[in-house]
């Protein structure tokens, strides 16, 4: 018996919610096929996609996450994993989380579902530790659970899934450069100015309220990140031009997706998303950096 999974990409931080907000995105994700084997070992085989994928289980986020699950269960079961890695590592759209989450969801199914989805987030996070040195859950939670998620607390993990408005669209541009999450985290100051913190948690509250009440204007007023974006945007070519163009095209808000280089914008409606897609395209076509743009409903 084998299981095929599509492990979606995700936008984390979502502007004001560093390490606590994220949502899954349609249209881009890793494809994986998993089956049990009799070797007591995890075998990883890449099929197309990203070429430099490590096949050593202790160095591959999927292998690390599965091992965390098996250790917790006290199981020696071996697995064969085929991965079509469509999301490049260092993209800012939850590459490591996609493989780690897809792997633990599939393994859990093959083992007869010993764990709840909520518990699986914990194992997927071990993949994140391997990739970035930190167990952040803002990609793993939406990738495992789907939709828009709040990480209310880390210790113990408390994740809340929230509904998002029906007509909320997301446009993500992925410039083909690599930013290592670990490095983008090391860049951040560990001190936060109280005035900025007040603006930030006001925005988090406003954003959640806006999502709940489908108040697009409130979502737009609340997205801005006053703490992290300024420190990281230096890593992203054209960031200010991109953000200006996107806002002029009518986006509700725009910020770095995860630790970059991807940049996301939220929009009300498909037509606005098309305008924003074109605006992103215009800015990046003038550079010599290859890029992809994905548009999808946030669901
Ligand atoms: N919240 C994490 C960060 C996400 O911004 O470092 C990394 O993908």
Image (cartoon, rainbow, N blue to C red):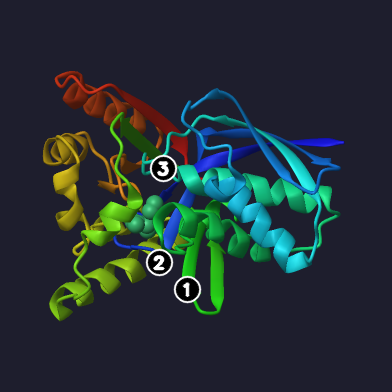
State which mark lies toward you, 3 or 1.
3
Q: Quadrant of ligand 1?
A: bottom left
Residue 192, given in percent of the width and then of the height, sits at 19, 75
Q: Are marks 3 and 1 in contact (CB under 8 Å)?
A: no
Is 11 placed above or below 30 here? below
Q: Name the residue nearer the viewer: 20 or 164.
A: 20
Q: Give the spatial CA distance, label 3 vs label 1.
A: 21 Å
Report if residue 163 is visible in the image. Answer: no
| Residue position marked by numbered label 2 in the rendering | 209
Residue 69, given in percent of the width and then of the height, sits at 69, 60
Residue 74, given in percent of the width and then of the height, sits at 79, 66
Which image quadrant is residue 228 in? bottom left
Q: Name the residue nearer the viewer: 17 or 297.
A: 17
Question: Which residue: 41% across, 42% down?
Answer: 93
- Count of marks placed on residues: 3
| Residue position marked by numbered label 3 in the rendering | 93
Report if residue 124 is visible in the image. Answer: yes
Badge number at residue 214:
none
Q: Name the residue nearer the viewer: 222 or 157.
A: 157
| Sooner in the amino-acid sequence: mark 2 or mark 1 | 1
Q: Give the spatial CA distance, label 2 vs label 1.
A: 15 Å
| Residue position marked by numbered label 1 in the rendering | 152
Q: Secondary structure at mark 2?
A: helix
Question: Which residue: 86% across, 43% down?
Answer: 38
Q: Are marks 2 and 3 in contact (CB under 8 Å)?
A: no
């Amino acid at each position: 018996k084998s299981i095929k999974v599509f492990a979606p990409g995700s936008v984390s931080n979502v502007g004001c919610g560093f390490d606590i907000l994220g949502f899954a995105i349609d249209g881009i994700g890793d494809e994986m096929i998993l089956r049990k084997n009799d070797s007591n070992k995890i075998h990883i085989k890449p099929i197309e996609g990203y070429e430099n994928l490590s096949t050593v289980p202790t160095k591959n986020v999927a292998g690390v996450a599965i091992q965390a699950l098996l250790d917790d269960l006290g199981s020696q079961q071996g697995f064969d994993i085929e991965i079509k890695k469509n999301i490049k590592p260092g993209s800012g759209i939850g590459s490591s989380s996609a493989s780690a989450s897809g792997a633990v969801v599939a393994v859990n199914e093959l083992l007869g579902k010993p764990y709840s989805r909520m518990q699986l987030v914990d194992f997927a996070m071990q993949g994140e530790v391997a990739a970035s040195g930190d167990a952040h859950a803002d990609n793993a939670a939406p990738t495992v659970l789907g939709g828009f998620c709040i990480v209310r607390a880390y210790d113990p993990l408390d994740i809340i899934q929230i509904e998002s408005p029906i007509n909320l669209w997301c446009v993500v541009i992925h410039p083909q450069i690599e930013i290592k999450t670990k490095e983008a985290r090391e860049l951040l100051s560990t001190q936060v100015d109280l005035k900025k913190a007040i603006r930030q948690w006001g925005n988090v509250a406003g954003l959640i309220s806006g999502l709940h009440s489908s108040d697009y204007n409130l979502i737009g007023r609340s997205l801005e990140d006053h703490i992290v974006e300024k420190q990281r945007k230096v890593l992203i070519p054209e960031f200010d031009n991109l953000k200006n163009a996107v806002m002029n095209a009518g986006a509700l808000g725009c910020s770095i997706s995860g630790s970059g280089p991807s940049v996301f914008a939220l929009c009300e409606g498909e037509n606005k998303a098309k305008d924003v897609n074109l605006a992103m395209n215009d800015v990046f076509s003038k550079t010599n950096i290859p890029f992809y743009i994905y548009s999808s409903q946030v669901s």
